[in-house]
């Protein structure tokens, strides 16, 4: 429903639940800017510039202004989508290719205006070439859709002739108090903001042939910089040109790899794999925050040249593919596979998803056949062997040092003095093999480095004691490290450690090697290997 002033009242059917779902599934607070940029920079809009202004408003909080000098938006008030103007369609739910309507170059899901409803106040001023001009105001859409227990439909008020603009034609959108006006790091951190823009929006456009045709000039103004800055379009590809840091090795997909997959049901998917990989990733600003968090790493999905989200690199790479996501900046372009409404993932149950997955794996297999790939893998393996050789020699030099201390058992060399939990486990098992532990019987049954308690064992302390079966034993270098590893004392039968920082605070149970440690209300049995009578620590000299 719209209210049109100086014209007539007009109602348009639109689903509250769908609008609410769209804005609640937003992947990033900047996605509203992403969608507005795609709308304003489409060929059909014929704009020469697009401005992004991020600012703090004293009444509403953090806000956006988005402006272009394109053809503007006309309004007809018609219910028939085929007869509606651009403003009707912008405010309507169904202005999108997915609804079967003719859409602009980057229009498909119809997300743009719906994401803008996640604010305290939305204002739109628009003028057309013919002189038509409108002002649209939507009051408190966030409150009506999100905060109220029973959502209300936001009603745009449309004022004919109400636009206040300094340009002859175009559109200015003010999104005041976006997401309750709260502050996000990108608003004042230019590096974070640009990472989003270049890896999640039209700014990082991946098709050079379309860039050569020309896009509007895109400028950015934020509190992070005093000046308005022009943003150059183009994905930050890994390239071999120019000077590189020492030891750099680069591989590029040139030409791009194109793979087509279809099935008997008439489904067809075409993917294009582009990009490259680098050994010294810091040169290209590639920071590893994990497969999905690292926008600049791994494998990104692009629709009509706009990168939207990262794909799971490990899911698509075939067996034997020796590139890891942290070295790569790949893009998969594909315009004919289903994504979710927020364009944040491929729909796994979609009919074309198996074709898409098959095509991507085939593209990776073709990379393996290239000279760049084989040269890069060969070089990295050489450096890895060199690094391992250096590390091995360093370890040997440390062991040969005059100050190196060793553990002797009954006068025989057993192991170097422990400096880590790994050393303690090795020493424990050597003592177990020599029946050197202070137990009548001890046998390790299982060990894991990943699933909680280190060892499951069976042991018997004295020849007259009960034999304890399937006991959980934790191994530590220093006893007190136990508290750093988030173990449950209820699940710990025994702790074997090399030493304790506070041995004087433990309760001695037997000799100098067996203690009871009161920990979180539990009395834990402790063995300190360093103090077993037959153990001696000394240098070889």
Image: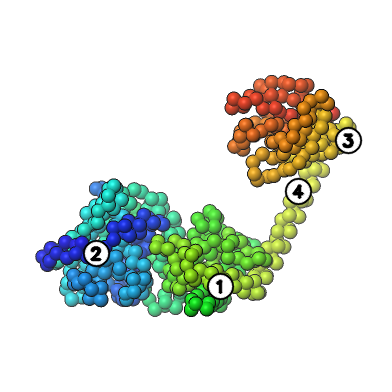
Question: Closer to the N terminus: mark 2 or mark 3?
Answer: 2
Of the numbered discs 4 and 1, the one sitting upstream in the chain is 1
How packed mark 4 is, by other alpha carbons closer than 10 Å (few <14, some 14-19, many 20 or more), is few
Residue at coordinates 85% horizontally, 34% vertically from top-left? Answer: 435
- Residue 178 horizontal/vertical position (percent): 31, 53
The earlier-in-sequence mark between 2 and 4 is 2
Q: Secondary structure at mark 4?
A: helix
Residue 235 is situated, as x and y percent measured from the top left of the image, at 47, 68
Task: Indicate the position of residue 449 as horizontal and vertical percent values.
Answer: 68, 45
Foreground label between 2 and 4: 2
| Residue 359 badge | 1
Residue hosting label 3: 412
- Give me the disc on residue 13: 2
Callout 2–callout 3 Cβ contact below 8 Å:
no
- Quadrant (top left/top right/bottom left/bottom right) for the C terminus: top right
| Mark 4 touches mark 3? (CB < 8 Å) | no
In what element is the residue under mark 1? helix
Residue 10 seen? yes
Q: Nearer the viewer, mark 2 or mark 3?
A: 2
Closer to the observer: label 2 or label 1? 2
> Distance between the Cα atoms at labels 3 and 1?
61 Å
């Amino acid at each position: 429903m719209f209210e049109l002033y100086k014209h007539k009242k007009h109602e348009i059917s639109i689903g509250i639940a769908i609008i609410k779902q769209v804005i609640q599934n937003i992947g990033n607070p900047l996605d509203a800017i992403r969608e507005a940029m795609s709308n304003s920079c489409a060929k059909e809009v014929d704009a020469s510039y697009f401005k992004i202004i991020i600012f703090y408003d004293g009444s509403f909080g953090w806000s956006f202004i988005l402006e272009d000098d394109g053809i503007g938006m006309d309004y007809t008030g018609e219910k028939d989508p085929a007869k509606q103007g651009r403003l009707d369609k912008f405010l309507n739910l169904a202005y999108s290719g997915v609804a079967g309507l003719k859409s602009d170059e980057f229009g498909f899901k119809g997300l743009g205006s719906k994401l803008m409803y996640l604010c305290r106040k939305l204002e739109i001023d628009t003028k057309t070439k013919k002189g038509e001009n409108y002002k649209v105001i939507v009051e408190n859409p966030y409150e009506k859709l999100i905060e109220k227990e029973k959502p209300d439909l936001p009603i745009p008020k449309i004022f004919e002739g109400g636009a206040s603009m300094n340009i002859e034609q175009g559109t200015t959108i003010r999104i005041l108090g976006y997401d309750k006006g709260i502050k996000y790091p990108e608003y004042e951190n230019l590096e974070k903001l640009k990472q989003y823009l270049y890896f999640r929006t039209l700014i990082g456009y991946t098709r050079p042939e379309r860039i050569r045709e020309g896009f509007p000039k895109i400028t950015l103004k934020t509190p992070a910089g005093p000046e308005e800055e022009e943003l150059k379009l183009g994905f930050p590809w890994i390239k071999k040109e120019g000077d590189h840091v020492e030891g750099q090795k680069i591989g590029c997909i040139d030409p791009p790899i194109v793979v087509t997959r279809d099935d008997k049901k008439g489904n067809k998917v075409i993917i294009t794999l582009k990009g490259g990989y680098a050994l010294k990733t810091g040169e290209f600003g590639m920071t590893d925050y994990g497969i999905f968090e690292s926008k600049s790493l791994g494998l990104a999905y692009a629709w009509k040249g706009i990168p939207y989200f990262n794909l799971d690199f490990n899911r698509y790479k075939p067996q034997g593919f020796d590139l890891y996501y942290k070295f790569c900046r790949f893009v998969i372009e594909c315009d004919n596979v289903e994504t979710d409404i927020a364009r944040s993932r491929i729909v796994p149950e979609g009919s074309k998803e198996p074709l898409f997955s098959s095509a991507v794996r085939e593209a990776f297999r073709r990379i393996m056949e290239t000279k760049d790939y084989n040269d890069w893998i060969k070089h990295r393996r050489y450096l890895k062997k060199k690094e391992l050789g250096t590390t091995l020699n360093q370890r040997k030099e440390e062991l040969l040092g005059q100050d190196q201390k060793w553990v002797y058992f009954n006068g025989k060399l057993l192991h170097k003095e422990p400096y880590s939990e790994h050393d303690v486990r090795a020493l424990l098992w050597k003592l177990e093999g020599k029946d050197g532990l202070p137990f009548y019987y001890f046998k390790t049954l299982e060990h894991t480095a990943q699933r909680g308690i280190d060892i499951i064992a069976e042991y018997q302390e004295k020849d007259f004691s009960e034999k304890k079966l399937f006991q959980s034993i934790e191994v530590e270098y220093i006893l007190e490290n136990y508290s750093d590893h988030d173990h449950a004392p209820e699940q710990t039968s025994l702790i074997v450690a090399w030493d304790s920082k506070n041995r004087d605070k433990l309760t001695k149970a037997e000799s100098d090697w067996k203690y009871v440690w009161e920990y979180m209300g539990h009395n834990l049995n402790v063995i300190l290997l360093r103090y077993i009578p037959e153990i001696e620590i000394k240098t070889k000299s």
